[in-house]
Amino acid sequence: SQKIEQNSEALNIQEGKTATLTCNYTNYSPAYLQWYRQDPGRGPVFLLLIRENEKEKRKERLKVTFDTTLKQSLFHITASQPADSATYLCALESSSNTGKLIFGQGTTLQVKP
Amino acid sequence: EAQVTQNPRYLITVTGKKLTVTCSQNMNHEYMSWYRQDPGLGLRQIYYSMNVEVTDKGDVPEGYKVSRKEKRNFPLILESPSPNQTSLYFCASSLNRGYNGYTFGSGTRLTVV
């Protein structure tokens, strides 16, 4: 069956450290993969998108990698700050099922001062 | 301001009473989609629309209807709401899904009693 999995356990790190979040998928051929940030009770906010033929994307303190062999994406936040505390969602759209964006359940990040 | 606007923000209704949740975007996006978010289940796609008069089912379409008569609006209709449709609903739109990500609305918290 098709699955997108993110660490369900919360990730707790110290301010200034690098946070690394994982997104694994099975039985998909993603055209692209996206990462979103969601704060409690609010809509997700788009952060980064990486396409199937790209290995890495960066935006300020954020970095996303995409390994289609391992079927995994890693999301890094460098020099993390308490304001980065939120739930982070990965989502993918399959190249064979355009229009359907499937989300993982998210990983909650807590950055402590 | 570029945004996706959902109304109402909160709604409590009774079983069987038809309701419509409106969604409007001012960014001339072709693609629009509806999601529901439930604890432990994450974001699940209900319906999506690639363009005017083009709609398709997501993963959980049962009990919902949509229409796309004009580009900016994509209402979600519950003909006969039931308690299992109590959820947090999000509308999203995108100009070019493979490059720009999605813009989400602020959400509609629906309670069916």
Image (cartoon, grey):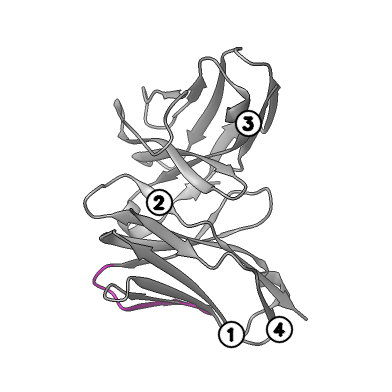
Query: In 3D space, how far apart are the residues under numbered discs 4 and 3 (Cα atoms)?
Result: 37 Å
Q: Is residue A60 visible?
A: no
Examine the rendered structure and indicate whether residue B52 appears above or below residue A87.
above
Residue B75 location (% of width, % of height): 48, 26
Which of B3/B83 is in front? B83
Examine the rendered structure and indicate whether residue A69 appears above or below residue A86.
below
Tell me if label 4 and label 3 are in contact, CB under 8 Å: no
Look at label 3 and name its amino acid: Thr
Residue matched to label 3: B86
Give the secondary structure at mark 1. loop
Residue B74 location (% of width, % of height): 44, 29
Give the secondary structure at mark 4. loop
Residue matched to label 4: A15
Task: Determine crowd level at label 1: few under 14, some 14-19, many 20+ residues with C-alpha closer than 10 A.
Answer: some
User: Seen from this angle, which residue lies furthest right?
Assistant: A113
Magenta region, residue range: A52-63
Give the secondary structure at mark 3. loop
Task: Determine crowd level at label 4: few under 14, some 14-19, many 20+ residues with C-alpha closer than 10 A.
Answer: some
Q: Is residue B94 left or right of residue B18?
A: left
Query: In 3D space, how far apart are the residues under numbered discs 1 and 3 (Cα atoms)?
Result: 38 Å
Residue B69 location (% of width, % of height): 36, 22
Q: Is label 2 or label 1 in front?
A: 2
Q: Are marks 4 and 1 on the same chain?
A: yes
Examine the rendered structure and indicate whether residue B36 appears above or below residue A48.
above
Tell me if label 2 and label 1 are in contact, CB under 8 Å: no
Q: Chain of mark 4?
A: A
Residue matched to label 2: A102
Q: Residue at x 31, y 44 (%)?
A: A99
Query: In 3D space, how far apart are the residues under numbered discs 2 and 4 (Cα atoms)?
Result: 31 Å
Location of residue A70 (image quadrant) = bottom left
Mark found first going from the N terminus, 2 or 1: 1
Q: Is residue B70 left or right of residue A29?
A: right
